Amino acid sequence: MIRPVYLYDTLTRSKQVFQPLNAPRVTIYSCGPTVYKDIHIGNLRTFAMTDWLRRVLEYNGYTVYLVRNITDVGHLQNDTEESGEDKLEYEARVTGHSAYEIAERYTRQYEQDSTAINILPPHLAPKATEHIPEMIDMTSHLLERGLAYEANGNVYYAVRNFPAYGQLSGNTLASLQAGAGGRVQLEIAEDKRAAEDFALWKRGEANRQMNWASPWGTGFPGWHIECSAMATKYLGEQFDIHTGGVDLVFPHHEDEIAQSQGVSAKKPVQYWVHGEFINISSRLFHQNTEGEGDDEMKMSRSKGNVILLSHLQEWGFEPLAFRYSLLTAHYRSKMNFTRESLSAAQNALNNLRADLAELPVMLYDTDDPWSDESLRQRDAFHVAINDDMDLPVALSIAREVPRDQKITTGERRRLLLDFDRVLGLRLDTVEPRATRKFSDEVLALVKQRDQARAAKNWRESDSLRSQLQAMGLEVRDTPQGTELA
Ligand code: AMP
Ligand code: ZN
């Protein structure tokens, strides 16, 4: 059944009917991790959001192509002010490892944690350090078009020359200049012409490990240009969806539009999808600190108040219980992380698995028709996931399936596994609790029926089906022969 997919688009600030540029193909660019420290459960929430978006689109019959980059250079410690050291260079300096070793170590941790919560790997994971020529090329184009200027080996984007600036975040030039958007009050690099301008290329200091030659001297790229360069290279000047956490709306994604559109004069991204943050109560983090309030605070690596997937495992929870807990909140609502909510998710997941284990295994042809009640449930599930990914509702529909008396037990299992294509809880790994034993008499009838079917003796096979049904059994034809439940 074809149903429209609705997505909330940050640019238009409204739910839109999703229409890909080249259906059935859908192209998604997702900002990946800066690999300078451990990836935390907040980062994982944002990556899982994109995973669900991909699965929802695939459930709708689209063919998704997902690119998620690895930021291994150019992300400064203070990205709104564009000040401080490069995060990777800093980590390398204080740990005594090379910046490349740091990047490799945390890329591996990010991949392992993503796999542990069943995030499907992106089709492509390009690294910023492997795309310096593309970034230089794009910067040169922006210089040619009068949208950038060079000063002392640095190249800045001249924000004033791009009138559409600010549409995504609402930080228009006027509001920025009035100081409302933040930047104007911030530290101004000496050679910037205007406070709102941002770096495309930075002069390299001699003590940096990661420097490259460029037409403007030795240096390294600004953070934002990598995503414009890699998205254009792999998805073209225009692609369907761009995702990330809400903190990336400004300046990262605002600057990405200015760069990509500045070069191509086309709207690069058709739908902007941003996920909300995981917050954490300060009490949970500073359990032993006296006088701490119970305020919620943002979990972020720069603040150091992070919880990792490995912490949850040390507390005895499964990674998939964390995934389950993410399903209980809509991706555009803030989530306050607590141990209690994780514990509730672990219990709920255990119960769902136990319910599933009770349902008998039946083999189906993928094109076997669904019963009317299953069709109704599938429809409700489909409506929920297509409504801007309303996964909490979709999960509650799935939760009802094991007890739905209007559906045969075997079909309940099939329905849950169908829903799990989207939910991604690895329900297909749940072992049935017991294989049902059938009497010799029943098994003899099954054998007789399979022989009749092989001989295309339909009259006999139908009469044997009736006999088995009269014994209270469900009978299904599969490529493997007669299946019972
Ligand atoms: P970073 O490595 O800092 O660039 O972050 C990687 C992704 O995680 C980005 O899309 C961020 O927006 C997102 N992110 C960072 N902190 C959180 C958080 N506490 N909750 C949810 N997403 C986050
Ligand atoms: Zn990005």
Image: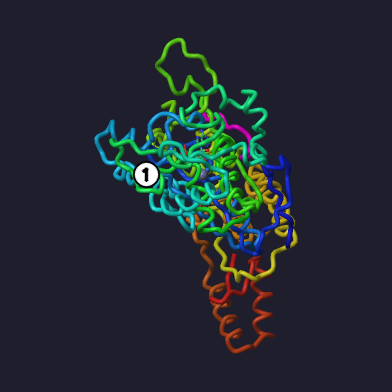
Locate residue 395, reporting x and y percent: 63, 45
- Report the span colored magenta: 330-338
Residue at 65% x, 37% y is 166
Q: Quadrant of the N terminus?
A: bottom right
Residue at 56% x, 41% y is 255
Q: Extreme left residue here?
A: 96
Q: Is residue 200 visible?
A: yes
Locate residue 298, reporting x and y percent: 52, 27
Q: Badge 1 is on which residue?
A: 217
Question: Considering depth in this image, is 289 or 217 the residue closer to the camera?
Answer: 217
Locate residue 19, reporting x and y percent: 70, 57
| Figure check: 299 above or below 30 | above
Q: Is residue 325 visible?
A: no
Q: Quadrant of residue 275?
A: top right
Q: Quadrant of the C terminus?
A: bottom right
Magenta stretch: dominant secondary structure: loop
